[in-house]
Image (tube, helix red, strand yellow):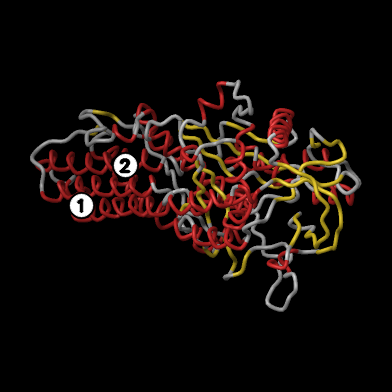
Amino acid sequence: MFFLTTAIDYTNGSPHIGHAYEKVLADVIARYRRLCGEEVFFLTGVDQHGQKVQQTAEKEGITPAEFVARTTSKFSSLWEKIGVEYDGWAETVDPRHKACVQAILSDLYARDQIYKKSYKGHYSVRQEQFLTDRDRDEAGNFGPEWGEVTEIEEENYYFKLSDHTDWLKNFLEQSPDTILPAFRKAELLNALDRNTGTDLCISRPKDRLTWGIELPFDKDFVTYVWFDALINYISFVGYTPDDTLPEFAEIWTDRPVHIIGKDILVPAHGIYWLAMLHAIGFTDEKMPQLLVHGWWNIRGEKMSKSLGNIIDPVELADTFGSDALRYYLVRDIHTGKDSDFDLDRLVMLFNTELANELGNLCNRALNMSKRFTDGVISFGGSLTDDDKALQQSLKENTEAYRKAMQNHEISMGLEALNRHVVHCNQYAERMKPWELNKNLENKDRLATVLHHLAESVAHCAILLSPVLPEASRKLTAQLNLPKLNDLKLDDLEWGLIPTGHEIEKPQPVFPRIDTRSKEA
């Protein structure tokens, strides 16, 4: 089982382009793994507890439950709009999650991994965590990233994070693939060095926060939002500390992949979560891989409400279509690195690589077949060097595609696919099927050329399916080969279209985006 999760989205806000990118990335990876013949379970959802949710709900004069229900619908509606399909949906107010969190807390408390103490210090309301002098800037101040910072003295419960930091450091140093891309691991190891000996506050007193999961061993406290939220990765696939449910063992068979943004690698996922799993009893072999993606920026600046540069993915999907948005989000960013959001590039990439290049290939392969051979795909005669070169291009670029997609480098996989499409269009320019059609003596040669173009369309439709599943199905329908939708990657070999096969009437699958009409 390939178990894939994304970070669950905090419901104290609306979905933005970063949320959309993370979910589309996960959806593409899940679809690709299914194309490879793997059984996949894709989990995503929403994080609904915490002080910020409670405060925002109070300001609006509604209950936290009403607030998160309203906000959750924004996220789920967007995922439906842009074609993100998941197997499991996590909401941290779910009774199953509450029961799992409380069972883990009880187990850790019974094993002396949780203790109570009094603490006085500075607290970040925005990040919902206590701060130390290590969090100050060079001038000795807490930076703007912490938002409002207040001084608090109170009793709380603490998880013995310090019991697990030596193990975690050794584990990370010896594991080359727990953090992906690998360059992110140095940041995590540096943070571990700075936090040696520090334990994690995992509670909030009810006189300050009521919107959370109550501690099972002290009714006056609720669980810290990060300790609660991270457990969704196991609570919604059937985990229990006594390991009585078979569902969890069936899903967490191999190392799962957690897709997260770089801002929540340290400390939440890279330190808290891995240490929590170790304390719960997970072995090194069962530790998840963390696939850490970068940010979408605007002219080099991080998107933020305060700067007023948030990009609304709902508006983009409504204006340009979900295909254009999905393609851009995984085409114009290299997994793990930042990228600048550029609306002109969204339009350019769709119009160039899909409308012009792939659309042109489909037009030549299918429209000319319909016009010149009555829609019947056949071939005859010996292969020329050009024919062999096209077949070699498909083979080499399919291998490059597979290698990139296996490494979660979706942009590079699409680059490989586009290289073959460009090769096909150059082949068509040299072969000139419209000229071959003028002489009956070229009948066999015309059929062979059109077959090579149509065969390439069939392969491209399958390779494109993880990114644009609806467009892929439209292409296989026009090829009159719905069985292609059931093929796996290892089934792709030359000859998907049998000789004598008749295609359907073609229709444009990638209509150009006309920015003039969008601006009107």
**SS class, disc 2:** helix
The residue positioned 61% from the left and 36% from the top of the image is: 280
Q: Work out which quarter of the rendered image holds the C terminus and state it.
A: bottom right
Left or right of 457, for residue 6: right
Q: Quadrant of residue 70?
A: top right
- Residue type, mark 2 in image: Val
The residue carrying mark 1 is: 432
Q: Amino acid at mark 1?
A: Lys
Return the x and y of residue 312 as percentages of the image width and height.
65, 54
Front residue of 32/158: it is: 158
Name the residue: 29% across, 45% down: 398
Residue 275 on image: x %, y %: 60, 46
Residue with the most extreme bottom position: 139
Q: Is residue 372 above or below residue 153?
A: above
Quadrant containing the N terminus in the rendered view: top left
Q: Nearer the viewer, residue 426 or 104?
A: 104
Which residue corresponds to mark 2? 457
Q: Is residue 263 left or right of residue 361?
A: right
